[in-house]
Image: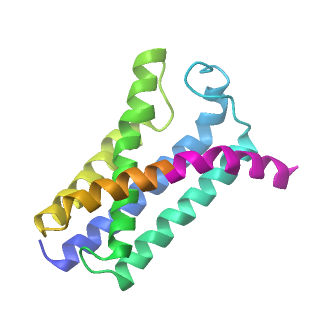
Amino acid sequence: MNDLTLSMMKLLFLFGFTLHNIEEALWLPGWSKHAKKFHHPVEKNAFHFAVIVVTIFGYLVTVLDFYTASPGSLFNYIFLGFVGMMGINTFLPHVAATIILRKYSPGLITAVFLNLPLSSLILFEYISLNINIYYLVFSVVLISGMVLFSLKYMFRLGENLIK
């Protein structure tokens, strides 16, 4: 695959990621009030704040990868960690929540039809470029953990800032 095709895949990833976040922003706060065993209820403003922060982070790591990274560089692994996190996000929580609760989890459609295929294509392309698989797995776990850990604090900060 050439650089132009990979660049287009990154742009499509941002498009899918953005649509996914819009879908969640519209329906997840209301859904969370009825999904207590899977997701703590979250207020709309707090969730919107967190979605904006995560979206900015996603754009930032993608732009840094576009302009400063080469395959296997630090910024490239941060970007790939984020891409991998969005692929995992398809299954945890969206597919799992939909199955367990037997109710549509907001973000499922965009996760399954946009985030998972685009994340997979990007990751497989970089794997074919012989990046270090252990660094890749480590970056996915690290970025996923950091974002998951920070969500509670982003919700709290969003609640306090918007009041």
Whole-percent x and y of residue 29? 66, 35
Q: Residue at x 39, y 66 (%)?
A: 78
Q: Residue at x 65, y 28 (%)?
A: 40
Q: Residue at x 70, y 35 (%)?
A: 42
Relative to 122, say whether 88 is above or below.
above
Quadrant of the rendering where the N terminus is positioned: bottom left
Q: Is residue 42 left or right of residue 59?
A: right
Whole-percent x and y of residue 156? 75, 46
Give the dominant element type of the magenta stretch: helix, strand or loop: helix
Magenta stretch holds residue 148: yes
Magenta stretch: give its range: 146-163
Residue that lies at the very extreme toward the bottom in this rendered image: 68
Whole-percent x and y of residue 94? 43, 32
Q: Nearer the viewer, residue 97 or 30?
A: 97
Q: Residue at x 43, y 23 (%)?
A: 98
Q: Is residue 71 left or right of residue 109?
A: left
Residue that lies at the very extreme toward the right in this rendered image: 163
